[in-house]
Amino acid sequence: GVGWMIGLSLFFMIAAIDWETRRIPRALSYPLLALGVLGMSKYGDRTFLIVVAAVGAYATLMTLRIIGQAWFKQEVLGLGDVLMSAVVVVWFGAINGLLGIGLGVVLAAIVALLGIKMGRFRRKDRIPLAPFMITGVALVWAVFYMMNGLGRVI
């Protein structure tokens, strides 16, 4: 109910702020993570799977961040994006979250390549990942909703 609406509002606020400033405020992401953890009981016995998937998503993006910084000698992923990967999994479940993050990364790559090709972006421009992760999980959730009905979203 109310917690879900507050959480979704925070997701959209984070996406808009990240798009404009290329920064995700911790004052929004930590409460969103806490609300997600409190709401994990809706998944019942799959809670352990969600925790493992959230830690895995966080560890994967943190590894990409470290490798990217070593390779390119500049920040390629912000800590806010890394944290948002865990938040997305906690909020939307292991399967929806991981598929949404993957789709978000693909969408970000497509937008970046098209932006470079059209002259809107340069190679060294920072492109926010959180709005694409949130869009990716929304698309995945919408597809599962249309296929299975609201009660059976994975």
Image: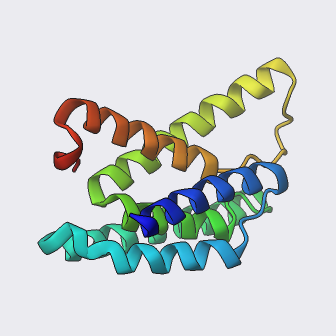
Q: Nearer the viewer, residue 32 or 24?
A: 32
Q: Kindly identify the residue that appears in the image at 76 percent across and 63 percent down.
A: 75
Residue 59, horizontal then vertical, whole percent: 46, 71
Whether residue 38 is visible: yes
Seen in the picture, residue 125 relative to 75 is either above or below; the reply is: above
Q: Kindly identify the residue that appears in the image at 66 percent across and 71 percent down.
A: 79
Q: Nearer the viewer, residue 151 or 95?
A: 151
User: Which quadrant of the structure image shows residue 55?
Assistant: bottom left
Seen in the picture, residue 140 relative to 87 is either above or below; the reply is: above
Which residue of the protein is positioned furthest toward the front in this rendering? 2
Q: Nearer the viewer, residue 15 or 72?
A: 15
User: Which quadrant of the structure image shows residue 88?
Assistant: bottom left
Colouring scheme applied when the structure was drawn: rainbow
Whether residue 57 is visible: no
Left or right of residue 82: residue 95: left
Seen in the picture, residue 97 relative to 143 is either above or below; the reply is: below
Indicate the quadrant containing the N terminus: top left, top right, bottom left or bottom right: bottom left
